[in-house]
């Protein structure tokens, strides 16, 4: 049985990025760029004005004498010619600068009267001028491969004239819940039955991570139903099951996976909650068998499945944010396993402060909603006192950690 860190490493060692595909710019948002984007031209494309004002020469402004206006350049226009001595050209933001321009005098620092303009405030060389290529040079890599595409990257891609880009394909993630005790959402609930909340919560977690969830419903407690639904699950880029992975009389997940030729990487992890978690490979398809307990399933998704999904999508940073926080109250645990504790972080001056978010029983889902982090307590430690520093990861079901 691997340790918590060993299990994470084994998963990432077995997962490789998915093939590339092309998409338009809006379809690329939140995806990872698969190849360098080289600028076909200088950015800015030409020298241009950063303000509405007047293109001037420095020596003409030295004495404060009025300058004769000899032209006007709107955004998208063309300068009437070079800037002559003793003259100025009115110019709008973004318009190309005339030859000979050494500064742009802003409208609010100028006085225009009868076809002349005079500076009423100090002006400095290159003031309010943008220069060709000062952002990106022609032939330079504007965005390197491996970059997460956000609105700023979309702007740069469009500025480089790029209409479509290559990105890593988004994984299709099949999700299967198991157990006769489960009922579908909306069905009447009777004693001994449990709503199949895991399918939709894991589907939501997949969607939040950037994947496409495909819900396969419930596999009932017989080999035939498991076999049929798990064959379908193995058609995904990633296959997730919940429950049925332990050694009970009606736990058929591992039995059927073996029958279907799935290769076991590990079964069980030294972590609580979530120790029954197992990981398999079917060719290039990762298979995650998560606990049936909803809290444990979500915690194991965040710590094990989500990093794998991010690697499949080409991310270089696959883990959620981590912070060091100061504990506010005592915490105790048994030795031997990493313990995941749902905590509430408070931010202020200095390091964040952490306290238990409530009842840590894994049947208590509401504690997940109150938490905005999960403390990862080392395996052999048994006691943590107020003032001790602990490692806290972001958590599914709570808000992202602020950094």
Image: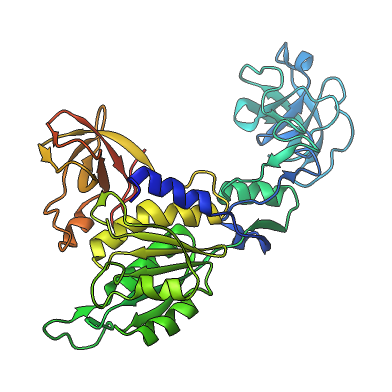
Looking at the image, is 204 positioned above or below residue 54?
A: below
| Closest to the observer, 76 or 39 | 39
Quarter of the image for the C terminus: give it.
Answer: top left
| Closest to the observer, 133 or 212 | 212
**Residue 185: x, y in percent?**
27, 82
- Identify the residue shown where x is 44% and y is 84%: 228
- Identify the residue shown where x is 37% and y is 65%: 289
**Residue 213: x, y in percent?**
45, 70
Q: Is residue 320 visible?
A: no
Residue at the far right in the pictured view: 81
Splitting the image into 4 quarters, where does residue 42 fall? top right
| Closest to the observer, 360 or 402 | 360
**Residue 353: x, y in percent?**
20, 35
- Identify the residue shown where x is 31% and y is 77%: 178
Quick check: 77 left or right of 228? right
Looking at the image, is 367 positioned above or below residue 173?
A: above
Splitting the image into 4 quarters, where does residue 19 fall? bottom right
Looking at the image, is 115 positioned above or below residue 206?
A: above
| Closest to the observer, 85 or 253 | 253
């Amino acid at each position: 049985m691997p340790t918590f860190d060993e299990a994470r490493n084994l998963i990432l060692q077995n997962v490789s990025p998915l093939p590339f595909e092309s998409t338009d710019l809006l379809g690329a948002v939140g995806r990872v760029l698969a190849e360098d984007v080289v600028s076909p031209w200088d950015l800015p494309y030409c020298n241009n004005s950063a303000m509405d004002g007047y293109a001037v020469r420095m020596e003409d402004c030295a004495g404060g004498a009025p300058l004769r206006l000899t032209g006007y350049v709107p955004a998208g226009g063309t300068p009437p010619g070079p800037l002559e001595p003793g003259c100025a050209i009115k110019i709008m933001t973004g318009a190309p600068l005339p030859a000979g321009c050494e500064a742009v005098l802003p409208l609010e620092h100028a006085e225009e009267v009868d076809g002349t303009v005079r500076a009423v405030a100090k002006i400095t060389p290159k003031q309010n001028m943008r220069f060709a290529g000062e952002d990106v040079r022609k032939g330079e890599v504007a965005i390197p491969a491996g970059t997460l595409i956000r609105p700023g990257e979309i702007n740069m891609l469009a500025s480089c004239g790029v209409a479509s880009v290559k990105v890593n394909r988004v994984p299709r993630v099949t999700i299967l819940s198991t157990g006769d005790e489960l009922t579908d959402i909306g069905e009447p609930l009777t004693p001994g039955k449990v709503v199949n909340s895991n399918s939709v919560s894991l589907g939501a977690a997949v969607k939040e991570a950037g994947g496409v969830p495909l819900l396969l419903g419930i596999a009932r407690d017989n080999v035939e139903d498991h076999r049929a639904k798990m064959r379908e699950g193995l058609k995904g880029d990633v296959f997730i099951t919940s429950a049925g992975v332990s050694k009970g009389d009606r736990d058929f997940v591992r039995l059927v996976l073996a029958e279907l030729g799935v290769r076991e990487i590990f079964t069980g992890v030294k972590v609580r909650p979530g120790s029954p978690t197992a990981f398999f490979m079917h060719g290039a398809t990762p298979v995650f068998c998560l606990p049936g307990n909803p809290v444990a399933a979500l915690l194991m998704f965040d710590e094990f499945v989500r990093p794998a999904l991010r690697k499949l999508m080409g991310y270089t940073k696959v883990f959620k944010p981590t912070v060091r926080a100061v504990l506010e109250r005592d915490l105790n645990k048994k030795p031997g396993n990493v313990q995941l504790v749902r905590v509430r972080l408070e931010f202020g001056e200095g390091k964040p402060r952490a306290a238990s978010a409530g009842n840590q029983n894994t049947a208590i889902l509401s504690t997940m909603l109150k938490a905005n982090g999960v403390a990862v307590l080392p395996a052999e430690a048994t006691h943590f006192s107020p003032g001790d520093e602990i490692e806290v990861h972001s958590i599914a079901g709570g808000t992202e950690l602020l950094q």
